Amino acid sequence: MSSPQFESAYLVHGDDHGRVAERRGRLASLAAEVSGAQGVETFDASQSLPGEVASALGAMTFAIGRRFLIVDGCESWKEKEVAEDLAPAMAALDEETTVAFFACEDGRRKAPSSLHDAVEAAGGRVSAEMTLKARELPRWAVGQASGLGLELDGAAAQLLVAQVGDRQQRIMRELEKLALEYGPGAAIGVEEVEASVADSSELAVWALVDAIVGHDPKAATRTYLELRSQGEDGPRLAGLMARRVREVLTISERLEAGVAPGEAAAGLRMSPYAAKRRVAEAREADAAGLRRALEAMARLELAGRGASRLDFDTVALRTIAVVSS
């Protein structure tokens, strides 16, 4: 296998901080694989001035092979300091040295234009990682899916964005999971996205339902209160909890009836991964207890529609204590 090829210099900047951090982590990992820990030097630009990085570039080291310098936080640097103190050192980079600058930009805090110029003059590569507007995300998702060997149609792309939110990293992770689940060349439509991609609220509630199904009342209560403090809608949480319990109960009853574990989740709208989890939960659960829990959940859903004199959270906490004990 051939070794990866590296440029002499990189500047990765933009307001998509997650993507900038992801690329920094990827380069650091590759650098450590190629040169070992001794061949990688890291700098925090909020603590290290451009002149200090310039001095490091010109310093002699005992490292064998390619040397990497990774500088984070370059949005804090000043134009003049980069132009006067760093640019001359960049113009004389050793051919076995790679220096990479990362800038998480926000408002006026941006990588200096003199840093752009210095990287380009050194024959390096400048990359912008910018967040997209919401209306641009479905088209972007279609393009990313194509790169993974998937044919994602427009309606499915819109649903995907609606399900997981506007974070490009999260959309990309879901596309990668779809690629693994359906394989190269698969056509992904609305049906596949609905079956395989959980929405943000569902993901948030998993920990809560895990605690309920796992009979951990303390964890369930704590998680419920955390979710509510984060603005999650109480009646919506109740509906998601009831759906999960209903799914596990259905599978549990099928297992009791002698259906094979591999077929117990047939017909339920969920991904293969989720189906395996539900089957595992059902095998550990008591069907009678799940029926009682589902009855309690039904009463909680009614409370969410105004059928109780008590405050909804009071009813919810009492229900959680009962069904998770």
Image (spheres, rainbow, N blue to C red):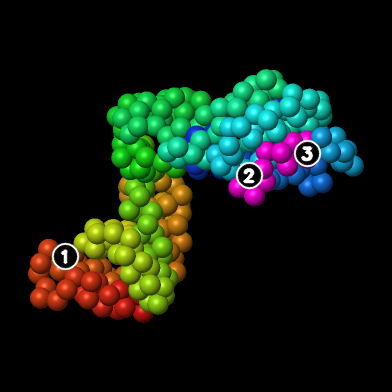
Q: Would you say the magenta stretch is mainly helix, strand or loop?
A: helix
Residue holding disc 3 = 55
Residue at 22% over, 76% down? 314
Q: Is residue 54 magenta?
A: yes
Q: Which amino acid, mark 3?
A: Ser
Which element carries disc 2, helix, strand or loop?
loop
| Residue in the image at 15% along x and 69% along y | 303
Residue 150 sits inside the magenta stretch? no
* Residue bearing the label numbered 2: 45
What's drawn in magenta, residue-wise?
Answer: 46-57
The image quarter in which residue 304 lies: bottom left
Q: Between tags 3 and 1, which lies in front?
A: 3
Sequence-wise, the earlier of marks 3 and 2 is 2
Identity, as a three-letter code, of the amino acid under mark 2 = Ala
Seen at 12% across and 63% down, the residue is: 305
**Neighbourhood count class around disc 3 (C-alpha, 10 Å): few under 14, some 14–19, many 20 upward:** few
Q: Nearer the viewer, residue 99 or 134?
A: 99
Image quadrant holding the C terminus, namely: bottom left
Q: Is residue 282 visible?
A: no
The residue tagged 1 is 304
Of mark 1 and mark 2, the one earlier in the sequence is 2
Distance of label 1 from label 2 (alpha carbons): 51 Å
Name the residue: 32% across, 53% down.
201
